[in-house]
Amino acid sequence: MLTIQQPEIVKTKSGVRMQAVFSLDGNDEILWYEVDEKYQNYLAVERADSFLVGLFLLALKKGCDINVLAPVSERLFYTLKTYLLPLLIDIGGYKPIKISCDNITTESLPNTGAVGTGLSCGIDSFSTIFNHIGDDCPEDYRITHFTFFNVGSNGSLGGEKARNLFKKRVELVKPCASELGKELITIDSNISEILELGFYETHTYRNISACLVLQKLFKVYYYSSSYSLKYFELKPDSCGHFDIFNMSMLSTENISFFSTCPYLTRVEKTRIVSEFKTAYKFLNVCLRDGENCGECEKCVRTLFTLELFGKLKEFSSVFNLNNYYRKKLNYIAKVIAYQNKNEYMKEIYDEIVDRNFKIPVYSKVAANYLRLRRII
């Protein structure tokens, strides 16, 4: 049995934590989420929602039932128990588990009506921002705050190395938040150390658990989708493929979650970002630490797509283009060779065809070699 106690607020040297003791296999541990002290009044300490969402993955992993000894939002309890958990058990091959809670509540918490989204400065992030800050977005759905969480993207298993990278990345995105005139709220957590699970297959639930901490602040929260709805699939190793379903299952009476830009492909999102002047100074897609290297898979993919749109020079201040030019021809070869094996490469190949892009001879020859090597 995994038992979750009543959350509490604890002050630390670096901020304020909302934390809860949970018991598993006779051992007590603490899951915590830390914010700056100025956001203390927005912490939803009356609810165990964050901890239920953050820990149900651990219960699935261990094959044990969950008992919550603190109030849980009725909508979340219902959707998690009735739809999301049975689905994850089915597609993941987990042992069936049960959730129990003696205090299920429909009572709304005080809420300021804020609208938030994560600010990673990547393609998904900027496309969400572009579509939700202008006058064409209804006022009650325009972004008012940005967030940046330490829940696994800086290292699936957490630890000091991940925490230091989190702090470094916060400093990189702060100037962007400032230019766009929005507050940046950071949340640190030990959820990665608790779960010991891969980030790719669990990122949605980790991030939403952190958002639920601030239910007194956010009325609407946008979670930037990684995949177009055309790629919707119930994959046990990739929760992002069915995020449009996840968002409905994780919303409460207080906060509504939305998977943004679900009909856009990565190429279409990149086209939008290519017109967003703020991105010219702050776009960051690199797989490595810090600034864009210009040569990793994500950098080269992004730069080649921008080149197809004739927007490469606009981003020259945030990418090492010399590194890109060295990798470009081989990347085009990979797109040609693997376009039927990779969703993103298929999108880029289709754009190459639509724009009558002249494929370099070297890339054609290299693509044939890659195909032959795969066959052999």
Image: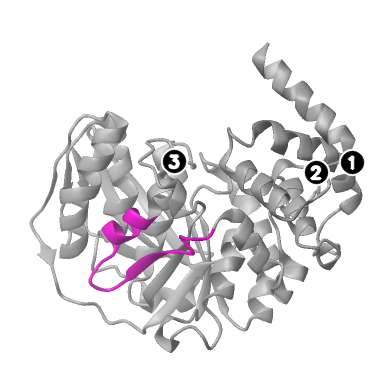
Q: Amino acid at mark 2?
A: Glu
Which tag, 1 or 2, sits closer to the chain's start? 2
Q: Amino acid at mark 3?
A: Ser
The residue identified by callout 1 is 326
Check disc 1 and report its element: helix, strand or loop: helix
List the residue tagged with mark 3: 238
Q: Residue furthest right?
A: 322
Q: Quadrant of the N terminus?
A: top left
Q: CA distance from mark 3 to mark 2?
A: 25 Å
**Residue 156 location (% of width, % of height):** 52, 41
Q: Magenta segment, which residues?
A: 244-264
Task: Look at mark 2 in the image and give the residue it sits on.
Answer: 295
Q: Residue furthest top?
A: 376
Marks 1/2: CA distance? 8 Å
Q: Secondary structure at mark 3?
A: loop
- Residue 234 lies, in percent from the top left, at 35, 41
